């Protein structure tokens, strides 16, 4: 039994239908037109069910077309008259005089299939305004003149029903699946269905049945080709069976190679067949640069046609395509990939060199599943190192680290020349360090490479990947020095540039020298098409972090969106990595709900393979997601994701230790443990300072100020001399204002945070200004600042923080009494509170006693009730 499919509201169309069916003047109804499956009948019936009067439905069919007035037979009864005029008169009398009221609504489904007499009868009813009419007509079908005149002459309103929008499709699917649908999977279903409600339904049900639509980490993901139910296939095959054989042959070729050059398809299938396919609306011709490509008008027709082609015929058709494409100049990676993939499943021989080149192309374009397939085929043909290395790289990106390591170990380093040794070593380091979490073994391989590789052009590659290892092991100064030395040289190989950008970009961002990173990013962009396409995403994390930490949030958003645009449909690893970058910016801007959804989906997309728990690429997503949950007051989810991050922590991600502590500080604040939150923020600052991560130290000190209202001004002032950008400058000015209880100064800093788009920082700033003005007895300014803080909190999806809580609910309590009161309201016992604050139970009891006295409540329950409105 399939899932239950609800009706997605189309309010505008629904209102138009009901208005037309209840109007007392003007037209007498509505006709819904649209493509098959867009939901015309469903919407029409739903609208008529809401009407108070009587509704009678008829449906046009091919079989009833041969019977005059056949579709109305059950409503008007039999007639012995052979005179059409008498027949229509009797039918009219039977319909209107048989106890039906003036408010009768006649519904006609598939009105284009009505016989001529039925169409005339409906037309006469409309002319006389005898009934209200709602009819559906399918686009692209021949329609009787009597029906078309209904809307042409203004008797019925014609309403074109468009397919669902992407958002409507997602709403429909998520309501059925009872859970969030991954954005990448939503794009795939949207593109395959075109928003057609019927197609959406059958695609989802087919994917569920085939097991290609499954839940991972609470997120529904589609992996693999679209699965089509037998019911949908039958519906589409009915149209396919009516296609002439020469047109069908053209469509069969297209299904194995879409898009296909118009000239190539015309050469293989005949120009007349292609023109007829376009005339029938089965294909469309689109411009691609200087050539014309043929595409299916609707992708699902291609899927059904593919299913109807036998294996032998499929091999023959692919062989024809290989021969035709090989006779032309093969320009660019996309054409090489297409030719190699076709050749693999054709009746023609496969060039091993083409397989190797195409596999490298596919990996470069982030299509690692296809890169894996081509590399495996190449390895089967050649048994050579190049194919094995490509296969290992494709495997490690997909989390299959064990197989990748086994494959690379099958080659002895002594048997390799220096170029091969560099490829072997860097692939092993990447696999061990970032896919397996075995940084010690990776360092051993790095040492071997440093000892054996001596060629001047190859050494920078080794030092480049060494800089990445160094920064991940929390040695950013060492990493930055190595990377900048590599990039200072004039002639550096692309892999050396990219590894140096990865290590140098991240280390400089963390060190507070983010202003230097855009120059490195420009060097990386120049070689982006010569390295593994997926590497640009984790390497780009440093660039996004640099822009964020320097307060250039608009620029960070633009660059993150550009990275996301590189993640093509179906490339789930690239999509997941790119969304970590976008989520990082959304977190800084206070778009916490968007960030949580995006990061949840990114983690689910990357949680694959045999070493998923050790993958380093996704570690920053766990940290950011924990912070976003905490900012929204979603304590249990924050606890869960931060616990997962702690379990994945280790030497291979040591650089993120201070940021993990900051996420834990946010969690403590969400629990109401303000003093612990401040301690964790200060601890993160100390850890960052010790490692030379001065940019992160500044963030941590600023967070400690935001949580406690206690100044970190002196150290932040020192950091302004070494850290780039506006963010630390504004934070330092705010810290001074907080230290001096200068409400106006805090407001000025908050306004600056708001100007650069750091809305969470601005919200807390206005909150502390409100608190400062309250203490100074300036009620008017306190109210104004509290209102500004609340407005910004709302723009940040109603984020919560200690400052926002205190500004919104000022109480005559010390910070410790407020903290204890919040824990009481959260249901903690005195012993639990004492354990969390690392104090005695007697001390906790003293705080509770004094808080009760100040709030004039009798006991612990009264305190909990008073504090309950100030915590989530």
Image: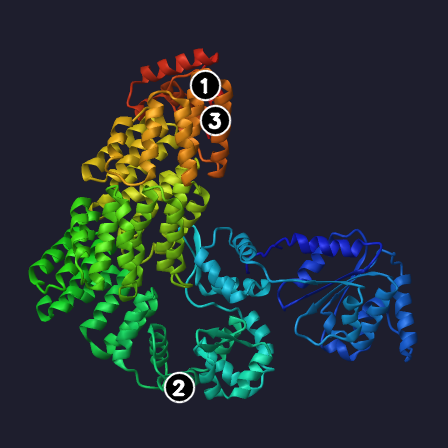
Please determine whether, in this image, residue 362 is positioned above or below residue 312: above
Please determine whether, in this image, residue 319 is positioned above or below residue 74: below
At which x and y percent is residue 869?
A: 50, 25
First reached walking from the N terminus: tag 3 or tag 1: 1
At which x and y percent is residue 803?
A: 41, 27
Front residue (pair 336, 377): 336
Viewer-nearest of discs 2 and 3:
3
Quarter placement of the N terminus: bottom right
Task: Determine which of the numbered discs, if any, sits on residue 774 in the image.
Answer: 1
Please determine whether, in this image, residue 352 is positioned above or below residue 593: below
At which x and y percent is residue 180?
A: 48, 51
Q: Secondary structure at mark 2?
A: helix
Task: Determine which of the numbered discs, if any, sits on residue 785 in the image.
Answer: 3
Front residue (pair 715, 655): 715
Q: Secondary structure at mark 3?
A: helix
Please determine whether, in this image, residue 284 is positioned above or below residue 659: below
At which x and y percent is residue 782?
A: 48, 22
Q: Secondary structure at mark 1?
A: helix
Q: Residue at x 31, y 40 (%)?
A: 725
Q: Residue at x 47, y 14 (%)?
A: 855
């Amino acid at each position: 039994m399939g899932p239950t499919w609800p009706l997605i509201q189309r309010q505008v169309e629904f209102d138009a239908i009901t208005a037309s069916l209840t109007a007392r003047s003007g037209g007498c109804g509505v006709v819904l037109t649209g493509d098959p499956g867009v939901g015309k009948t469903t919407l029409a019936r739903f609208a008529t069910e809401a009407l108070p009067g009587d509704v009678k439905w008829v449906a046009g069919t091919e079989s009833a077309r041969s019977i005059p007035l056949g579709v109305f037979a059950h409503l008007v009864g039999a007639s012995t008259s052979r005179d059409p005029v008498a027949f229509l008169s009797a039918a009219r009398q039977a319909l209107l005089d048989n106890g039906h009221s003036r408010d009768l609504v006649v519904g006609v489904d598939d009105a284009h299939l009505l016989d001529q007499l039925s169409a005339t009868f409906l037309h006469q009813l409309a002319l006389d305004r005898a009934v209200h009419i709602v009819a559906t007509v399918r686009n692209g079908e021949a329609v009787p003149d009597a029906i078309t005149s209904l809307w042409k002459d203004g008797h019925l309103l014609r309403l074109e029903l468009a397919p669902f929008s992407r958002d409507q499709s997602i709403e429909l699917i998520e309501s059925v699946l009872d859970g969030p649908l991954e954005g990448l999977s939503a794009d795939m279903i949207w593109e395959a269905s075109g928003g057609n409600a019927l197609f959406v339904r059958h695609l989802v049900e087919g994917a569920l049945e085939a097991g290609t639509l499954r839940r991972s980490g609470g997120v529904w993901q589609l992996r693999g080709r679209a699965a089509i139910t037998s019911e949908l296939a039958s519906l589409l095959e009915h149209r396919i069976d009516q296609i002439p054989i020469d047109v069908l042959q053209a469509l069969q070729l297209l299904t194995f190679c879409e898009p296909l050059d118009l000239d190539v398809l015309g050469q293989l299938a005949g120009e007349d067949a292609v023109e007829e396919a376009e005339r029938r609306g089965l294909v469309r011709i689109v411009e691609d640069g200087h050539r014309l490509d043929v595409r299916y008008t609707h992708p699902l027709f291609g899927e059904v046609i593919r299913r109807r082609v036998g294996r032998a015929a499929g091999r023959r058709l692919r062989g024809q395509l290989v021969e035709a494409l090989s006779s032309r100049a093969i320009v660019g990676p996309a054409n090489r990939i297409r030719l190699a993939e076709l050749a693999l499943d054709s009746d023609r021989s496969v060039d091993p060199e083409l397989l190797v080149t195409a596999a490298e192309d596919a990996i470069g374009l982030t299509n690692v599943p296809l890169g894996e397939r081509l590399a495996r085929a190449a390895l089967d043909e050649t048994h050579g190192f190049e194919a094995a290395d490509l296969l290992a790289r494709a495997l490690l990106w997909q989390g299959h680290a064990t197989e990748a390591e086994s494959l690379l170990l099958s080659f002895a380093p002594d048997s390799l020349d220096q170029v091969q040794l560099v490829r072997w070593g860097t692939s092993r380091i990447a696999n061990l360090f970032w896919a397996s979490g075995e940084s010690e073994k990776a360092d051993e391989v790095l040492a071997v490479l440093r000892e054996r590789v001596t060629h001047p052009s190859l050494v920078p590659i080794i030092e480049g990947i060494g800089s990445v290892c160094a920064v991940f092991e929390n040695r950013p100064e060492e990493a930055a020095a190595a990377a900048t030395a590599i990039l200072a040289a004039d002639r550096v190989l692309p892999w050396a540039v990219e590894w140096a950008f990865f290590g140098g970009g991240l280390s400089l961002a963390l060190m507070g020298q983010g202003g230097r990173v855009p120059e490195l990013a420009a060097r990386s962009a120049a070689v982006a098409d010569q390295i593994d396409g997926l590497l640009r995403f984790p390497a780009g994390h440093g660039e996004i972090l640099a822009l964020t930490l320097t307060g250039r949030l608009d620029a960070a958003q633009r660059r993150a969106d550009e990275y996301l645009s590189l993640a093509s449909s179906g490339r789930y690893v690239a999509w997941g990595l790119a969304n970590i970058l976008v989520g990082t910016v959304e977190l800084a801007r206070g778009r916490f709900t968007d960030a949580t959804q995006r990061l949840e989906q990114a983690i689910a997309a990357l949680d694959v393979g045999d070493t998923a728990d050790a993958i380093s690429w996704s570690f920053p997503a766990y940290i950011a997601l924990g912070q976003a949950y905490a900012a929204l007051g979603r304590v249990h989810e924050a606890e869960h994701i931060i616990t997962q991050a702690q379990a994945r922590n280790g030497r291979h991600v040591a650089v993120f230790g201070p940021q993990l502590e900051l996420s834990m500080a946010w969690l403590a604040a969400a629990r109401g443990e303000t003093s612990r939150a401040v301690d964790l923020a200060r601890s993160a600052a100390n850890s960052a300072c010790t490692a030379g991560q001065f940019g992160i130290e500044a963030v941590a000190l600023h967070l400690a100020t935001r949580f406690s209202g206690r100044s970190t001004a002196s150290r932040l002032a020192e950091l302004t001399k070494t850290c780039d950008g506006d963010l630390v400058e504004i934070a330092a000015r705010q810290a001074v204002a907080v230290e001096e209880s200068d409400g106006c100064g805090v407001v000025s800093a908050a306004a600056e945070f708001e100007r650069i788009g750091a809305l969470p920082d601005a919200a807390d700033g206005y909150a502390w200004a409100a608190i400062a003005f309250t203490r100074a007895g300036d009620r008017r300014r306190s109210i104004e600042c509290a209102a500004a803080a609340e407005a910004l909190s709302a723009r940040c999806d109603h984020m919560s923080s200690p400052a926002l809580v205190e500004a919104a609910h000022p109480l005559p309590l010390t910070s410790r009494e407020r903290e204890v009161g919040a824990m009481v309201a959260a249901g903690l016992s005195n012993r639990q509170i004492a354990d969390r604050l690392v104090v005695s139970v007697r001390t906790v009891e003293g705080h509770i006693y004094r808080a009760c006295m100040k709030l004039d409540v009798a006991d612990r329950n009264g305190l909990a009730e008073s504090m309950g409105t100030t915590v989530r």
